[in-house]
Image: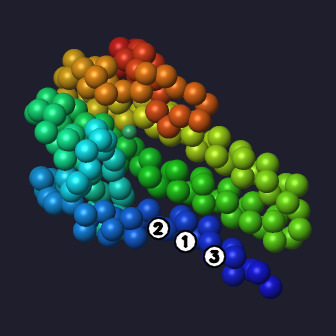
Amino acid sequence: MYSYLLLLPLLITLFPFTGLPWIMKRRSYLLKNEKYEIRVLKGHSQINAFSVRGLKRGYIFLTENTASLGENNVNAVIAHEIGHLEKGHHVKMALLVGSLISLSMFFLLNGMSWIAIPILLFTVLTQKTLTRKFELEADKYALKLVPSQDLANLISSYGDKKSTILSTHPDILTRLKNLNNN
Ligand SMILES: [Zn+2]
């Protein structure tokens, strides 16, 4: 009777590829149009950037402050985000999270919340762990596009100083070490 609730995981899975790019495009202006559309988000002061995988193409969004960090930094940020898109991180994450949430919903709807809740907790932890792994992969990919010194400078200046089990980013030292081990 509540089986329409099973549509929820599908919507959660599809939103990042459909609604999210649509919303973000409207809040930003075009900086460069290359293989991926590079756009600047209006009215955000923090230093931040992220990428979005649309159905037709990928987008990279920088906050206004990030876009004004100077050429070397901006190129390093963009190279890192290109890494996420080229490595298919958005699709991998959506498939994993979508299927785990579906599984959890299935148990919940069948009155087995004692299985559903651990699966949800597992989903959150897996998502965080995978995100940190993807950050290191994106940094590695970025080395193909920009000098490693530029990437190291960016990470040292703007990376997270500490990382915990719930962090989405590995700490600065882990990221710098990752750049140097081949
Ligand atoms: Zn990243």
Say left or right for 139 vs 9.
left
Q: Amino acid at mark 3?
A: Leu
State the image quarter where residue 48 is shown. Answer: top left
Q: CA distance from mark 1 to mark 3?
A: 6 Å
Q: CB of residue at label 1: within 8 Å of ligand 1?
A: no
**Do callouts 1 and 3 mark residues in contact (Cβ within 8 Å)?**
yes
Q: Amino acid at mark 2?
A: Phe
- Secondary element type, mark 2: helix
State the image quarter where residue 95 is shown. Answer: bottom right
Q: Amino acid at mark 1?
A: Leu
Return the x and y of residue 103 as percentages of the image width and height: 73, 61
Residue 33 position (above or below residue 74):
below
Q: Report which residue position mark 2 lands on.
A: 15
Q: CA distance from mark 3 to mark 2?
A: 12 Å
Return the x and y of residue 25 as percentages of the image width and height: 26, 65
Q: CA distance from mark 1 to mark 2?
A: 6 Å
State the image quarter where residue 109 is shown. Answer: bottom right
